[in-house]
Image (cartoon, coloured by chain):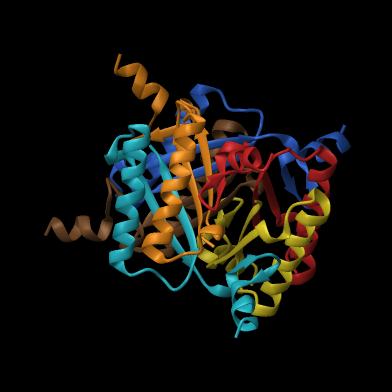
Chain colours: A brown, B yellow, C red, D cyan, E orange, F blue
Amino acid sequence: MPFINIKMAGPEPTSEQKEQIIQEVTDTMVRVLGKNKERVMVMLETLKDDDIGVGGKSIKKIKEESK
Amino acid sequence: MPFINIKMAGPEPTSEQKEQIIQEVTDTMVRVLGKNKERVMVMLETLKDDDIGVGGKSIKKIKEESK
Amino acid sequence: MPFINIKMAGPEPTSEQKEQIIQEVTDTMVRVLGKNKERVMVMLETLKDDDIGVGGKSIKKIKEESK
Amino acid sequence: MPFINIKMAGPEPTSEQKEQIIQEVTDTMVRVLGKNKERVMVMLETLKDDDIGVGGKSIKKIKEESK
Amino acid sequence: MPFINIKMAGPEPTSEQKEQIIQEVTDTMVRVLGKNKERVMVMLETLKDDDIGVGGKSIKKIKEESK
Amino acid sequence: MPFINIKMAGPEPTSEQKEQIIQEVTDTMVRVLGKNKERVMVMLETLKDDDIGVGGKSIKKIKEESK
């Protein structure tokens, strides 16, 4: 029954990286909590740099200012 | 006040299917809980097959392995 | 694979009402989109009146002002 | 630690508008609750008009019917 | 149509603080994006210190280690 | 920047289990995607059995029927 939603900044992970993440976080839920592997649902979402902010600034602005 | 967020794998529903889903889940909240129809908000999100995992594998991988 | 998250104001639905909502929204996804019933996950969350706001005011305040 | 997720209908805000929203909601959390500015995370998501419903109809349909 | 979900660590804000946050983030969406005030929905969720992690540690552990 | 939200059925994990989950999913994001550990935010939410449904039934009902 665990639902794991991972929202992150780009660059978008490759399919292989996504597969690795899905496998590892599922394994964590099964090993640590004994959850039923078939019932673990994972959803990944990659957002654009100007859609994410930390410390009051978008990632886009933070990256521009660090050039 | 109900907020209903539906995240799902593709293929992306047609506009007609989306309209049907919005209408039905709204009706459920109104009929079962007496909620104010005008205050029911529904948001649909369709994700790519490699962004969703079940049982430790992405939908993409599950589909490839079932060919 | 559909994940349906329903956040709402109280009063908290009864177990019977929750069962009805889970059944109906699952049926909508199966009937309208042909989704696999066993893969439809629904999560309900009831929030307190001062944790929800519409039109710039909390539900708590709206209810107090309508007395 | 606050995580602020804002989902909205289009048109997609400009980068400048996104920057303004990120700055303002972060400031609100810092000023009202004394949160650590560097720990405030904001994520913005713009959805298509047929992916959002209010009152049992999609925004797309509402806009079409109001022409 | 904007839906704003704010998840945060405790202590839980007072009702007055919640009212202030709801009002301010709603005002931001109306002023910056011209959204319809009556359609802006805000939901606040306060989580326990051991339910939130940053940098690989829970807030609970971070607070314990900083004593 | 990754935000990881894990919603699950009870029983609620112990603080030690929560610590383990936070540490492991954070490590996955750092190792697989090279994310900045200090920017990885994890939020855990445990829901009651009648608030979660799979296959059109609540966990509560599934457990009752399996007795």
Q: Front-most of C52 and C25?
A: C52
Q: In which quarter of the image is residue B28?
A: bottom right
Does E15 appear above or below F29?
above
Q: Where is residue A13 in the image (x, y as percent from the top left)?
A: 38, 61
Q: Where is residue E46 in the image (x, y as percent from the top left)?
A: 50, 34
Q: Can residue E4 be seen in this view?
A: yes
- Identify the residue at the far bottom of this view: D67
Residue drawn where x is 61% and y is 74% of the image? B11
Residue drawn where x is 79% and y is 48% of the image? B33
- Identify the residue at the far top of this view: E67
Q: Front-most of E24 and E6?
A: E24
Q: How many labels does the image show?
A: 0
Q: Is residue A7 visible?
A: no
Task: Give the quadrant of the C terminus of chain B.
Answer: bottom right
Q: Front-most of B22 and F20?
A: B22
Q: Quadrant of residue F38?
A: top left
Does F21 appear above or below B64?
above
Q: Position of residue D6 (x, y in %)?
A: 46, 55
Report whether B30 appears left or right of E11: right
Report whether C42 appears left or right of A14: right
Residue drawn where x is 42% and y is 54% of the image? E27
Q: Position of residue F26 (x, y in %)?
A: 39, 40
Q: Front-most of E56 and E23?
A: E23
Does E67 appear above or below D33?
above
- Identify the residue at the far left of this view: A67
